Amino acid sequence: MSSIGKFIVVFKQGATQDEINEYAEQVNSGKVTHQYATVLKGFAADLTESQLQNFQGSDIIEYIEPDSVVTTQ
């Protein structure tokens, strides 16, 4: 399966690092490009459609959004 895009996966505050690592390991056909641990808990990754759907149904994930460049002016 090929990636459908880059996403940021943000976990609820109660999620443990072990739980977050389990989800990151599920991204075996894509790749985790960054892990977040200070301001928010989560990671950025290339996800397949199946992975995106599975993650969206999780109780410990707060939200998933497309990863993009943000600028200020």
Image (spheres, rainbow, N blue to C red):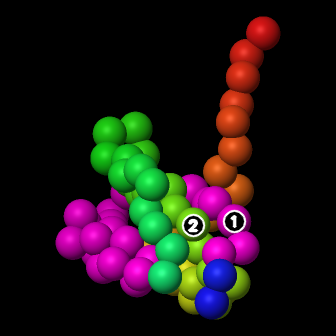
Q: Which mark is residue 5?
A: 1
**Which quadrant would the N terminus be assigned to in this image?**
bottom right
Q: Which mark is residue 46?
A: 2
Q: Amino acid at mark 2?
A: Asp
Earlier sequence position, callout 2 versus callout 1: 1
The spot of residue 21 in percent (x, y) is 28, 71
Q: Label 2 to label 1, Cα distance in Å?
A: 5 Å
Q: Classify 48 as above or below 18.
A: below
Residue in view at x 49 percent, y 82 percent: 29
Q: Secondary structure at mark 1?
A: strand
The spot of residue 43 in percent (x, y) is 44, 57
Q: Locate residue 55 relative to residue 20 in the image: left or right.
A: right
Q: Amino acid at mark 1?
A: Gly
Q: Classify 30 as above or below 5.
A: below
Q: Which mark is residue 56?
A: none
Sort mark 1 into few (<14), some (14-19) or many (20+) by Cα contacts within 10 Å.
some
Q: Range of the magenta residues? A: 3-28
